[in-house]
Image: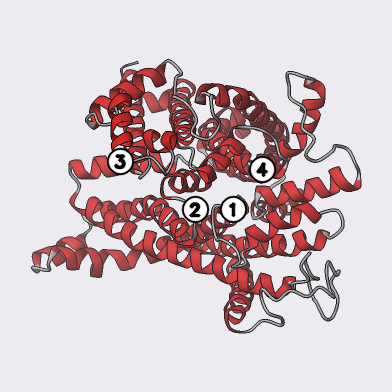
Amino acid sequence: MKNILQKLVTLFITLFCISFLTFTAFSVIPGDAALSRLGKDASPEQVEALREELGLSDPLPVRYGRWIGSALQGDFGESYRYQNNTVKSLISHRLPVTILLALISLCIILVISVPLGILSARYSGKWIDVVSTQVTQVIMAVPAFFLGILLTYIFGLVLKLFQPGAFIAPSENLGASLRYLFFPALAVALPKIAMVVRFLRNSVLSEMEKDYIRTAYSKGNSENAVLYKHVLKNALIPVVTFLAMVIAEILAGSIVVEQVFSVPGLGRLLVSSISNRDYPVVQAIVLYITCVVVTMNFIVDVLYEVLDPRVRV
Amino acid sequence: MKRNWNLIIGLGITAVFLTLAIVGQFWTPYGVTQMNSAAVNRPPSFAHWMGTDNFGRDIFSRVMNGSGSTFFVAVCTVLSGGLIGILVGAVTGYFGGWIDNVVMRVNDILLSFPSILLALIFISLIGPGKYNIIIALGILFIPSFARIVRSEMIRAKELDYVKAARIMGVGEFRIIFAHILPNAWVSILTSAAIGFNNAVLAEASMSYLSLGIQPPQPSLGRMLSESQAFLFNTPWYAIFPGLTIIFIILGFSLVAEGLRELQE
């Protein structure tokens, strides 16, 4: 318990540092809200006056305090690019799509990779394991966006199972939306499936070599009984920690793959905002993504401790 | 002794594509940006091995030249990130103390982010472009090298040969760089191979999002994003640059795998 509390404190310190760094980094970039609002033709006096009015001349810690205060209430100010749009409304429209995409790919990853990883370990050295090792090695080398393009070509253009570019919002028609999102989710999932399969296989195999497994065999357990009753329980624990990394990878993959399938999610917003120098939006998304990754790691860390009492000592 | 096939095949693939890329900087079958309205969207043939694109440019020439940028970015990032990382890891690991704690904490956080994500965050700060990609990825690779060298330092600094060197009056920095570091070279190389792998993937992704190498300079990621509009009629425009990326990454990851086997 004390350990978890300590981790919680570390989490908050980390989150504070990240938010401060994000804020400072973006306030060092030339060009601020006053400039972007007035345009290039404004006189220096006008810019200075608006800066004063917006509080941009205050010292950094003061501005950070104000920014994080409203950010905690979900207010990230207004977009430079989309007039009269708050950053909050821009993000809240796109966030559900990205979350849906990430969830579908996580489901695909778990459903395929867990059985495959176990099979590959169960029959290690046999043909199924050899094939799986070679195939996963190759799949890991395929970038998610190229997989996306291949899937678009095969399933979208040749087999016509979906219409590339014609995304339907989940609020309009959930079924159609899910069917469209299945393909980008698959593109994100495939390289990660390969990663998880390999990781699970090695985890099971290294567990198989331990002494308690020999004891279980000597008591007359069959190979399947040992695997399912004893090995898996322990072999799955490291996989849980590995999942935090997989989720962060899914997030990164989605950002790129959204572009391939023109899915209007957080990633597309981020990429277009970077190109448009729409800093309030970029700042908010960067803060959001970093916090998700750090918090995810914290959750997995705690989960690890709950699942494996040995770590607590 | 069992042959280390991963290492052999990986080095072979890497050598082939590296040669193509280097040759592509000086000579290509056709001009890299040379358009030809008489040969637009041609499928692969003897004249154009990988076909031509919507401007009649030879895709094979562009792939050769574009993979040069890919290798250039990868080598620069791994070298810069690797050198700084080794330095940081050696000093923090050998001397320890609170700096070590802080640096490792920062490393932990950086390592929990996929490189594409971190590259995107850095690019959002310093803007798109080839050299910005190198800076962003170079910084990102510092932790993975620092960690490996650090653990080697911690393991070795209490060993007898290091103690003996210290008693003989060898300077601390000579101990770090001349005595301990050479023992870690296989793990550093493994880490470098993984770094190359990630750098190629991140560069291709950034260029695909048009945040990396800027036109008219050809790059594999950029070609893929341009090919998408013509996917149905000219699938080869997407397939060949894509396959090239896959082979380059596969080569590096096989080398990494082979080096890991070598360690065991």
Residue type at numbered disc 3: Pro
Q: Residue tagged by mark 4?
A: A259
Asked if the residues shown at circle 3 and circle 1 are in contact, with their CB atoms under 8 angstroms apart, the answer is no
Residue B226 visible (yes or no): yes
Q: Are marks 2 and 3 on the same chain?
A: no
The local secondary structure at tag 2 comes to loop
The local secondary structure at tag 1 comes to loop
Of labels 3 and 4, the one closer to you: 3
Disc ID at residue A44: 3
Q: Position of residue B118 (x, y in %)?
A: 46, 45
Q: Are marks 4 and 2 on the same chain?
A: no
**In whole angstroms, how far apart are the C-alphas of marks 3 and 1?**
34 Å
Q: Position of residue B107 (x, y in %)?
A: 35, 44
Crowdedness near tag 4: few (<14), some (14–19) or many (≥20) residues, C-alpha within 10 Å? many
**In whole angstroms, how far apart are the C-alphas of marks 2 and 3?**
28 Å
Quadrant of res A4: top left
Near-viewer residue (A133 or A223): A133
Q: Position of residue A296 (x, y in %)?
A: 48, 28
Q: Residue tagged by mark 2?
A: B128
Asked if the residues shown at circle 2 and circle 1 are in contact, with their CB atoms under 8 angstroms apart, the answer is yes
Residue type at numbered disc 2: Pro
